[in-house]
Image (cartoon, coloured by chain):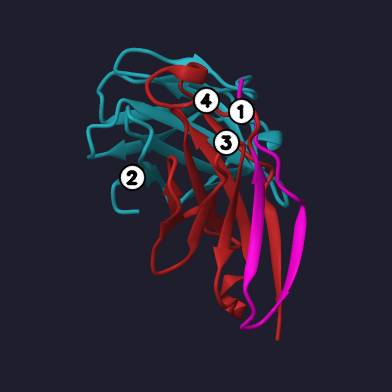
Amino acid sequence: DAKTTQPNSMESNEEEPVHLPCNHSTISGTDYIHWYRQLPSQGPEYVIHGLTSNVNNRMASLAIAEDRKSSTLILHRATLRDAAVYYCILSSRGSSNTGKLIFGQGTTLQVKP
Amino acid sequence: NAGVTQTPKFRVLKTGQSMTLLCAQDMNHEYMYWYRQDPGMGLRLIHYSVGEGTTAKGEVPDGYNVSRLKKQNFLLGLESAAPSQTSVYFCASRSTSGNTIYFGEGSWLTVV
């Protein structure tokens, strides 16, 4: 099965950029890379996803390595509301990886004022 | 996350009681999942389904049963609740292509 690895925790200062890495060296060609974040007592919230090309939306950017074995979630200006646990998730097309979602262990982001 | 609805949101059970959590999605997704999340931990897969009428075990299936009689609904059952099943339960669904995942808002279950 594919596997994703993330650092357990990271710190950032408010209004500075944050780069959250995810390693997925066993990713297959049909796996989408998703990023979700979770605030205390809430369900996972969608941040961004991509397949091969870098992606931008109003919340963040996703930089995908050319070999797709790693990706980086970029928060351009961290705010206190961005403090959360960030999950990198692989989602395969069809029944690859038996249809499971492959979760990283999550990175707890602390944002200091 | 309006596409995935979990009921109930909160429930207190006595040890040995049974209950069913319902996950409903309206996006015609084939794949559905039940996870549990304990304090300070990540999500752990209980059971999942790759289509109507099919179910499969995840990493922590003991003490739970599931059914997927209709494509839009995935039910998680506790036949005889135990305090160790006190947790937050999340349902998720995803598209066949893998490019869309939706999570429910969670169901808080306490077993006393």
- Residue that numbered label 1 is attached to: B16
Residue at image coords 39%, 64%: A57
B13 part of magenta stretch:
no
User: Which comes sooner in the sequence, label 4 or label 3?
Assistant: 4
Distance from disc 3 to disc 2, alpha carbons, whole Å, reads 33 Å
- Residue that numbered label 4 is attached to: A28
Q: Kindly identify the amino acid type of the residue bearing the numbered disc 2.
A: Val
Foreground tag (4 vs 3): 3
Distance from disc 2 to disc 4, alpha carbons, whole Å, reads 27 Å
- Residue that numbered label 2 is attached to: B4
Q: How many marks?
A: 4
User: Which comes sooner in the sequence, label 2 or label 1?
Assistant: 2
The residue stretch that appears in magenta? A1-23
Q: In this orientation, which residue lies closer to the viewer: B82 or B16? A: B82
Chain displayed in cyan: B
Chain displayed in red: A
| Drawn side of residue A48 relative to residue A63, left or right | left
- Pinpoint residue B38: horizontal percent, then vertical percent: 68, 45
| Drawn side of residue B47 relative to residue B84, left or right | left
> Mark 4 — on which chain does it sit?
A
In the picture, which quadrant includes the C terminus of chain B? top right
Q: Kindly identify the amino acid type of the residue bearing the numbered disc 3.
A: Asp
Cβ atoms under marks 3 and 1 closer than 8 Å? no
